[in-house]
Image: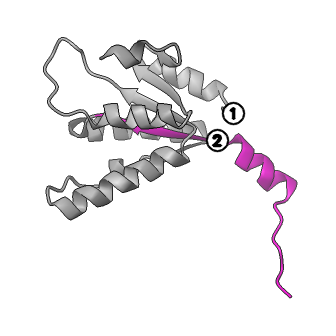
């Protein structure tokens, strides 16, 4: 007979409190975003699902496909995506964060922007804008789960 593991009340409560956050930004900001990941982890009850922060950039097709799929898995696991946006007045040749935010939106994840609205979809009422990281972090600390 197979034993069925049931979560104790404490384990179940801890799982319900865990807010899963995906941090999206252009790859060149990876080291900076790692510090924000540390801030979120310091809250204690939140998890950052962004494995791209631990990786290296690769140019071969197989690696790019694998990382793209991994990033989509990480967004799927998240409750909230925080997009670290860029000043729309400057040229930004890369934009994976736009696809990631759209994917999150399509899957009914909450999307927060920091600190700019870069395009028309960022004006949707569901996209919440924060002017600075500290403001965003305070809101995260006040959230147990979305």
Instruction: Write the residue at 24% across / 40% down.
Output: 27
Q: Position of residue 12 (x, y in %)?
A: 79, 52
Question: For the point 24% across and 33% down, which residue is it?
Answer: 95
Which colour style is shown?
A: one colour
Name above or below for residue 81 compared with residue 121.
below
In front of the other: 59 or 115: 59
Within 10 angstroms of label 2, few (less than 14), some, or many (20 or more) residues? some
- Report whether residue 127 is seen: yes
Q: Which residue matches tag 1?
A: 144
Left or right of 5: which side holds 56? left
Labels 1 & 2 near each other (Cβ < 8 A) = yes
State which region is magenta.
Answer: 1-25
Where's residue 114, x and y in %? Answer: 39, 20
Q: In which quarter of the image is the N terminus?
A: bottom right
Kindly identify which residue carries mark 2.
45
User: Looking at the image, which residue is at 52% across and 13% down?
Assistant: 125
**Residue toward you, 125 or 38:** 125
- Please tell me whether mark 1 or mark 2 is closer to you in this view: 1
Which numbered dot is residue 74?
A: none
**83 relative to 146 in the view: left or right:** left
Is 76 in the magenta? no
How far apart marks 1 and 2 lie (CA) works out to 7 Å
């Amino acid at each position: 007979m197979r034993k069925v593991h049931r979560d104790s009340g404490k384990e179940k409560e801890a799982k319900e409190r865990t807010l899963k956050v995906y941090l999206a930004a252009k790859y060149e900001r990876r080291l900076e975003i790692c510090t924000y990941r540390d801030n979120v982890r310091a809250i204690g009850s939140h998890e950052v699902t962004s494995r791209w922060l631990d990786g290296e950039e690769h140019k071969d097709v197989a690696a790019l496909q694998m990382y793209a799929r991994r990033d989509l898995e990480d967004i799927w696991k998240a409750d909230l995506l925080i997009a670290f946006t860029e000043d729309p007045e400057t040229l930004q040749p890369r934009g994976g964060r736009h696809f990631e935010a759209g994917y999150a939106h399509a899957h009914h994840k909450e999307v927060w922007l920091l600190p700019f609205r870069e395009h028309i979809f960022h004006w949707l009422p569901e996209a919440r804008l924060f002017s600075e990281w500290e403001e965003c972090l305070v809101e995260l600390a006040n959230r147990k789960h979305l």
